[in-house]
Amino acid sequence: MKSYVFGPVPSRRLGFSLGIDTIPYKTCSLDCVYCQLGRTLKKTIKTKECVSSSLILKQLKKVISSGRKIDYLTFSGSGEPTLNSKIGEMISEIKKITEIPVAVLTNGTLLFKKKIRENLKKADLVIPSLDAVSSSVFEKINRPYSSLKIDKIISGLTKFREEFDGKIFLEIMLVSGVNDNSQELKKLKAAINLIRPDKVQLNSPVRPPAEEWVKPVSLNKLKNIKKLFGKNCEIIIPFKRKKQTAYQKDLEKEILALLSRRPVTALEISNVLGAHLNEVVKYLEVLEKKKRINSKIHQSKRYYGII
Ligand code: SF4
């Protein structure tokens, strides 16, 4: 049976985060050029119960009762979690069984819809993203579903802030030469003033992106942007907990054994080893840093191999 719950995985922002995946692989309202999961396969804004919520809750209860250290239950995964129409009900059910806080990682594009805002209000922490304010930059970096307009998205985020009592961390992914020019940064600053998030988190692609041409901005530039955005702004740094008990050497070995046979994609590793794609992506990142593996794009797909 497919597992919709993965981890806990060490997260840069959330400590030990137990991931909840409510969406089929790469179903999203955007097709971001920096997406670590590859290109979007189904671009949509239509919500539905794509995965059985009772099955997800059953799997979740099992992991929670195992007593493993979990700092957050996090809706994230293979696409945009708000596209699952039952996300609000799922959060309400989770609140009945545990006090572990609930976070939702979302691209924020659907918050202009009242029902989506109602669903997310039940969470403790919502982390929406906003990478652009100009339509042309939005189109270039996020490649949205055709009817999505950035002005409407920003007013959805602003409305959500007015209605939501929990915390909002607004994530901005900066891609060199795309949304890091002074004009766009000034517009982003004005949008932040409207949205009033509790924190602004600056990020830049550190994992292999969907498009090979995507490059991160330098740390120096990130520091200057942080200054421009003011005191609630932080740069997301790599996870630095001393004891990463969530990291399993066995899974690392299995990944290396698989790659020693032939180059494979992250999705193939996930399918063969039965580990969630997001978990696999994090292991691949560690192995690339250790210079044990490398990756190459071939026919629009990223393949990993042993060095
Ligand atoms: S980064 Fe997030 S919002 Fe963008 S395409 Fe990937 S899953 Fe969708």
Image (cartoon, rainbow, N blue to C red):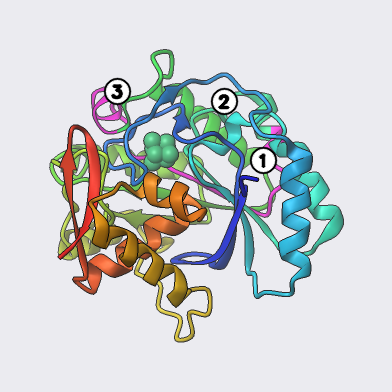
Residue 55 quadrant:
top right
Find residue 134 and report its horizontal and vertical position in percent.
Answer: 28, 27
Circle 1 Cα neighbour tier, 10 Å, few/some/many (<14 / 14–19 / ≥20): many
The part of the chain drawn in magenta is 118-141
Res. 191 in view: no
Res. 121 in view: yes
Residue closest to the eye, 264 or 203: 264
Q: Classify mark 1 as within 8 Å of ligand 1 or not, answering yes or no.
A: no
Query: Which amino acid is tagged 2?
Result: Phe
Q: Residue at x 16, y 46 (%)?
A: 176
Q: Residue at x 33, y 59 (%)?
A: 258
The numbered mark at residue 120 is: 1
Residue closest to the eye, 300 or 250: 250
Q: Secondary structure at mark 3?
A: helix
The numbered mark at residue 112 is: 2
Q: Which residue is mark 3?
A: 135
Find residue 4 and report its horizontal and vertical position in percent.
Answer: 62, 47
Q: Classify mark 2 as within 8 Å of ligand 1 or not, answering yes or no.
A: no
Q: Which quadrant of the figure shows ligand 1? A: top left
In the image, residue 198 lies in the stretch drawn in magenta = no
Mark 1–mark 2 distance (CA, rounded to whole Å): 12 Å
